Image (cartoon, coloured by chain):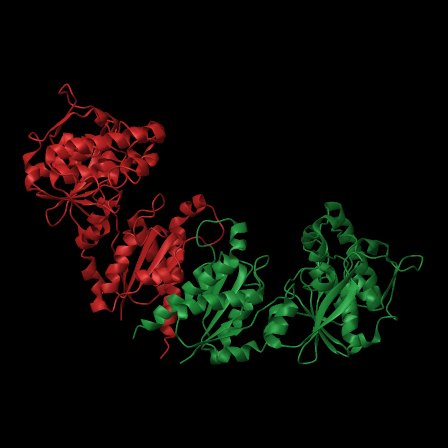
Chain colours: A green, B red
Amino acid sequence: MTLSILLAPDSLKGALSATAACAAMERGARRALGATPCRFTPVPLADGGEGTIEAFLQGAGGTARTATVRGPLGEETKAQWAILPDGRALIEMAQASGLTLVSPEHRHAARASSYGTGQLVHAALDAGCSALLAGIGGSATTDGGAGALQALGLRLLDEHGAELPSGGAALQHLADIDTSTLDARLAQTDIRVLCDVTNPLCGARGAARIYGPQKGASPADIETLDAALNHFADVASRATGRDLRDEPGAGAAGGIGWGLMSFCGAQLTPGIEAVLEATNFQDKLESADLVLTAEGSIDEQTPQGKALAGVARAARSAKKGRGVPVIAFGGAVRLSGEALQEMGITAALPLPDAPLSLQESIARSDELLADAAERALRLWLCGSQNAMT
Amino acid sequence: MTLSILLAPDSLKGALSATAACAAMERGARRALGATPCRFTPVPLADGGEGTIEAFLQGAGGTARTATVRGPLGEETKAQWAILPDGRALIEMAQASGLTLVSPEHRHAARASSYGTGQLVHAALDAGCSALLAGIGGSATTDGGAGALQALGLRLLDEHGAELPSGGAALQHLADIDTSTLDARLAQTDIRVLCDVTNPLCGARGAARIYGPQKGASPADIETLDAALNHFADVASRATGRDLRDEPGAGAAGGIGWGLMSFCGAQLTPGIEAVLEATNFQDKLESADLVLTAEGSIDEQTPQGKALAGVARAARSAKKGRGVPVIAFGGAVRLSGEALQEMGITAALPLPDAPLSLQESIARSDELLADAAERALRLWLCGSQNAMT
């Protein structure tokens, strides 16, 4: 019998891409398996942040496209997007409006704009796509999606009827919104935003307060941006007749979740679920004996919508509920064996092989992940050869 | 069927005793096993250093005794020894002449004496024991066993015919050895020294150069001690008619291995083998399904006579060569999966569950070992329940 192993890791942020994690796990597992006949199916995962397009293209196939767009601070940048085999467009906000596009010393949370993300949506519409998936993790912006909406034709006007400049802070001067100029094709377009957070647009758990600091916002910037987003929501609700600022996920990616919901009829959907669906993960599970997955940190946040939780949920329901065992690997493992079992994970192995620093752990992550996969497979195989009968 | 698990860890030096390691592994394994019927047999191991008596008493039974002896620097100290069920005495050099008996600021390698260890041998002879096992790890001394031999009646004389004072450095003044006063019972006593090193008495790999620094010897002390041991060996070979200074293990424990071989007919024997024999380890393996073992560090030294290697060797030859699988745990794991397999170890799991310091790893060793045992058992059980048929 051939042992069929599904490799379904998230990226290990700052250390390994999901694709590299697949390769490391396969290498380690092969060392343990020796001459055992085996087949590996790599399904690199993503949650909507950086690497989402790569994961989709690897797991589901599709065609990569490139567009030239405005980066977070207005500079020209090349952004990849994709057309999936089912005809849907896939865009990744990090490609156009990502935090990593701006060097740390130039970060400017109050001024960063999501304009380039809107240009990607525009490119997808131009290509004839009538359905679109948008990964929005890793953004540099806190503009409620204002820039993206402007790129799609929405007019945001000050009290003199002039178009607002870029960035979230400018929204405090918003007096009126003209929706009549919005790209008409959006009304016929199904937009799904991949979103794993439940933050509202404003307030203590809002976009500015929770995600502002990592985007370089000062305490004063945060106050300004939170008030500006709140004001944007006031004006928008008058323009659209509905107020979505407290919807779960409204505050994702600097509020673009809210902006696309409010003006483009977008829906928010868990990132990992969309990836699993696009990669036919459930079908692949039916012929798998074992799933290997990985995540940078396996901790109390893991059960709440991280990739690992989605993989475990899918694996548990596979094979008419008999399930497929899942072994997980993490740079850190802070969940108890019992908590992991409840998620449907057989065991989670931490990567460090000795006392070491985070820096060393990241530098050696490829080797450490392969070693951990080897250990896990050796134990699993040994158990299977010593089955209690 | 009841799953029978043998718990056979060494101590994790500075972190957990072998007995505590047994308890932690059992606790973790039970969390994985849940309602699976299982039986645990703890066999705490030792290699002749601190914890050897505890391990023997737990694994083989026997009676603990206490003697009041001279510590390394002459101060009075209580030392435990034991009479094993087969009538042999077991003494532990660390109890009488151990490095941990002297606070770091008072360490004095040149003056430290093994006298108390000789007093323990004396106590065993007084109790009627005609066979004796001596664990010699963890000593503070570099006196070639001079002190121990003096405690047993040997006279070490300077050029004026006066008895030498305590410590290795004094041996440079040795002019003559009087063996006629040595305790006559030693000739009828079978002494086995538990020894895991192969160092000669003197020279580049000798007792002073290799082990002197950790006993507080300065570079000058090391030169003095190495020359003094060499001189001791010169005079001794004239007195006994044989020269054992280059025998493997002559340099163990500050040279007491050599001293006991030269004057008491002692034999050196691997510590782990003696422990495994005394605990009937081979018999216990015949009814075991799985062995869990542990060591502070699993590294390139492990295959050379450490406890883990002995356990693996015994497990591999059990059940008429079919073997019993061994899972190992270590504070650090620096051997490849292939090297472990060659030793007969299925897999070795490192204890750290995240990037952490050595200090933190030691402080959390009990919890980390239990968690690692739980992981290993969950993987093993999962494999056994998904046996490839």
Q: Residue drawn 39% across and 58% down?
A: B349
Q: Along the horizontal axis of the image, is A234 left or right of B32?
A: right
Instruction: Classify A271 as above or below B29.
Output: below
The number of callouts visible is 0
User: Where does residue B21 sit, x and y in percent of width and height?
Assistant: 32, 51
Task: From the top left corner, tell me how far across and down residue B202 is, in percent.
Answer: 26, 37
Quadrant of the image containing the N terminus of chain B: bottom left
x and y percent of residue B378 in the render? 39, 65
- Can you see residue B62? yes
Q: Report whether residue B68 is seen.
A: no
Residue at 33% from the left image edge and 72% from the top image edge:
A385
Question: Is residue B129 shown left or right of residue B5?
Answer: left
| Residue at left offset 61%, top offset 67% | A46
B385 versus B179 height, above or below: below
Camera-side residue of B250 and B234: B234
Q: Quadrant of residue A83?
A: bottom right
Image quadrant holding the C terminus of chain B, namely: bottom left
Residue lying farthest right? A160
Q: Nearer the viewer, residue A63 or B372?
A: A63
Q: Nearer the viewer, residue A148 or B304?
A: B304
Residue A25, image x, y percentages: 49, 66
